[in-house]
């Protein structure tokens, strides 16, 4: 979460320079897991600090696995713009634990970049997902290459290396993790703080995936994912509801494997959104519960039932239309029986239509309508 903390700084040496701190202790940008740190929220809180007459400078403390490039670049540029003002209040950045991916780019924006000695910084090419035909995928590749070039420019400007060197050494499609001292040697950290932080200790020695899991395993974050997933399924089901509801029996599941099929479907969805569904004890928090699976099974079963009802309605509507057309055709072709009597049986030689036939057809139509709740059957 983004928070702003008033710090008095070094009271003996800097009584006249109170400093405020903005915490980026979350993923960059909103996600399924949390609200994250968005550019709009960051700029709002940053402006509040800058507008405070008692605030002489701002420290942006970072402990983040990275996240949205769009949100992160906007945060990076907001810090850079402020620092480029000759008379403006300076914004400093500090690595309190991990500054991975987009968070590492933000870290470099500070007027002075510091890092606690037990922190790590990770840099790599941008990543994402694409969907569509070959042309769509090629367009996505081109877009990602252009995004990489923008981040290469920022790295080159901070480190003093050429863009070609950055591409060859860092943006070569591998992950590059640096200790605080290594980040200083690279030129992206200006000064190493010779102490430790609890935030860094909690993430020390963890892989990139483990760091991501650390920021995603909060119970309320997991529940948020399932809530949004259920809401999406519910919204989709609403579109399949027919206009009229009928009291037809609910169809029973034909296959005993249906729960397993649904479970596999959920597993695919969970994997798509970045969860690790596994039986290992250290990832048990990512395993969907029986209650969640049962709830999703019920919702998906409702979809099958609604689809079956819609098919039944369509079939009955067609049967009614056929019968009504048949009745109208018979009525149009009917001739009065010889002798001028209306309502009697037709004379076989006269081409008339019997009342008994029409009554039987009308009765069938009426019965069909009654089954659909369109009109009552007259038993008289």
Image: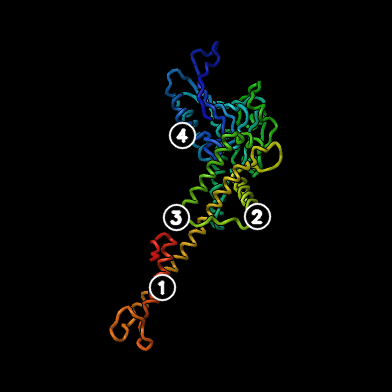
CA distance for labels 2 and 3: 28 Å
**Residue in the picture at 52% in, 42% down:** 228
How packed mark 4 is, by other alpha carbons closer than 10 Å (few <14, some 14-19, many 20 or more), is few
Mark 2, residues whose alpha carbon is within 10 Å: few (<14), some, or many (≥20)? few
Q: Which residue is mark 3?
A: 245
Q: Earlier in the sequence, mark 2 or mark 3?
A: 3
Local SS, label 4: helix
Check disc 2 and report the residue beneath it.
256
Residue 115 at what x, y percent from top left? 62, 26
- According to the image, label 4 marks what residue? 40
Q: Please report whichever mark, 4 or 1, sits nearer to the chain's N-terminal start.
A: 4
Q: Are marks 3 and 1 in contact (CB under 8 Å)?
A: no
Extreme residue toward the front, this view = 380
Q: Nearer the viewer, residue 232 or 97?
A: 232
Colour mapping used in the image: rainbow
Residue nearer the viewer, 226 or 110: 226
Q: Nearer the viewer, mark 3 or mark 1?
A: 1
Q: Earlier in the sequence, mark 1 or mark 2?
A: 2
């Amino acid at each position: 979460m983004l928070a702003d903390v008033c710090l008095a700084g070094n009271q003996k040496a800097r009584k006249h320079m109170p400093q405020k701190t903005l915490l980026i202790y979350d993923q960059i940008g909103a996600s399924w897991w949390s609200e994250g740190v968005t550019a709009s929220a960051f700029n709002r809180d940053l402006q509040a600090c800058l507008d405070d007459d008692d605030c002489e400078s701002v420290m942006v403390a970072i402990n983040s696995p990275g996240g949205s490039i769009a949100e992160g670049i906007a945060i990076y540029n907001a810090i850079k713009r402020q620092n480029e003002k000759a008379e403006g209040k300076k914004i400093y950045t500090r690595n309190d634990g991990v500054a991975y991916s987009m968070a590492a780019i933000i870290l470099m924006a500070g007027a002075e970049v510091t890092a606690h000695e037990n922190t790590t910084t990770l840099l790599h090419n941008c990543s994402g997902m694409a969907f569509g035909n070959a042309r769509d995928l090629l367009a996505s590749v081109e877009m990602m290459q252009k995004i990489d070039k923008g981040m290469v420019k920022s790295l080159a400007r901070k480190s003093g290396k050429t863009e070609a060197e950055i591409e060859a050494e860092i943006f070569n499609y591998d992950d590059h993790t640096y200790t605080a001292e290594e980040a200083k040697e690279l030129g992206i950290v200006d000064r190493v703080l010779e102490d430790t932080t609890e935030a860094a200790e909690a993430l020390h020695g963890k892989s990139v995936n483990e760091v991501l899991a650390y920021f995603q395993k909060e119970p309320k974050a997991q529940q948020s994912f399932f809530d949004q997933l259920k809401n999406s399924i519910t919204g989709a089901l609403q579109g399949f509801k027919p206009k009229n509801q009928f009291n037809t029996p609910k169809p029973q599941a034909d296959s005993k494997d249906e729960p397993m099929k649904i479970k596999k479907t959920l597993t695919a969805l969970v994997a798509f959104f970045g969860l690790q569904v596994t039986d290992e004890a250290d990832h048990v928090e990512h395993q969907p519960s029986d209650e969640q699976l049962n709830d999703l099974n019920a919702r998906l079963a409702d979809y099958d039932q609604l689809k079956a009802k819609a098919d039944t309605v369509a079939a009955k509507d067609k049967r009614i239309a056929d019968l009504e057309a048949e009745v109208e055709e018979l009525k149009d072709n009917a001739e009065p029986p010889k002798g001028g009597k209306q309502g009697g049986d037709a004379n076989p030689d006269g081409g008339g239509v019997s009342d008994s036939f029409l009554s039987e057809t009308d009765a069938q139509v009426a019965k069909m309508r009654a089954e659909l709740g369109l009109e009552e059957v007259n038993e008289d």
